[in-house]
Amino acid sequence: MRVSLKDVAAHAGVSIKTVSNVVNNYQHVTPAMRERVQRSIDMLGYRPNLAARHLRKGRTGIIALALPELGNPYFAELAAAVIDAATAHDLIVLLDHTGGRREQEVLVSQGFRARVIDGLILSPIELEIDDLRDRAENVPLVLLGERDYDLPYDHIAIDNVAAARAAVRHLIDLGRREVAFIGARRGRSEPAQLRVRGWREELSAAGLPTDDGLVAATDGWGHADGAAAMARILDAGRRPDAVFAYNDPMAIGAMRVLHQRGLRVPEDIAVVGFDDVVEGRFGAVTLTSVSPDKGAIGRLAVESVLARLGGGESPEPRRIWADYHLAERESTLGRAAPGGRQD
């Protein structure tokens, strides 16, 4: 038999409104009263009907998260962060995979699931400004990633140029003088362009070479792409003393090729990745990587959706910069080198 608010109120000897205030975590409840009601909730096994609660507010209690690559560890970890943040607000996350294809991103952004979701968090790759400018659906939309649309939607990202410069500066500070970049995109990709720009700016500021022979473009961003890009640089007769990779899977692929070619990391070639995925922390050589605050990105995205569901006047659209740091590990510092942030 389902336990109701009325049952809990009778057991605790309080009003139904008081029980409701405790269940909904209202602030103006004394600690003693909260403990008293919670004791009855636990004893009776009461579980709130979240669906009914959302429906009373004219909502479904579901938000959608659309990502380009679920197989990419970064997006998997980001999805977990969004789900954790949504759970804290009693929300369910509907996960969608766009494959980074424009037609799928358009379909998602135009609200083909608008009747079942309260808001959409979208990380686009190929979506154009006009696709969003003509968006008729009024379901709140929050954008993730580095594509700059200059449109009235909340947009959460990290500063890729500054993050790339921090990675390259770390290598320069360690005495590296010929730094390659792997993962420049053959097609259009704003994140890749921004990271190449940061690489180029920091090397130029230090008076170091940034010639095209040090840049390897790829069609994808996986382990195999990183391995192939590293092999091309070496096969062309270049021997950089450091590599900055577009992301961690590419960096790990590059390190595999370096090992196969008899080159040591970091003694011969230091390697830095981007995204700080769990995989990079448990290899034979742990990976130095730019570490975006994925927990903050997930929390900010969910809070941005909720802010537009508040019922009052919607806040002005914001460009929100999430934090990051460089997690320094063995691929640049070596096994015996102490110091650096390694979390």
Image: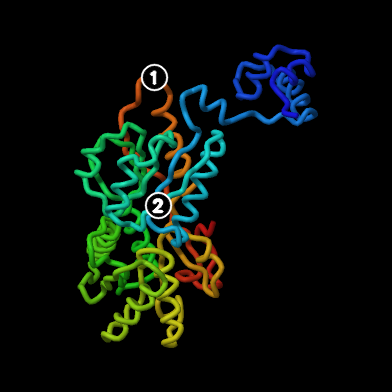
- Where is residue 248? Give x, y as percent: 43, 65
Could you say which quadrant of the image residue 110 lies in?
top left
Local secondary structure at mark 1 = loop
Indicate left or right for 56 with 1 as reference: left
| Residue assigned mark 1 | 312
Indicate left or right for 267 with 157 as reference: right
Q: Is residue 340 above or below residue 137?
A: below
| Residue assigned mark 2 | 67
Q: Nearer the viewer, residue 338 or 28?
A: 28
Quote the CA–CA distance across marks 1 and 2.
29 Å
Local secondary structure at mark 2 = strand
- Where is residue 121? Give x, y as percent: 39, 42
Say which mark, if any, is on residue 287.
none
Could you say which quadrant of the image residue 230 lies in?
bottom left
- Where is residue 114? Give x, y as percent: 38, 36
Indicate left or right for 261 with 198 as reference: right
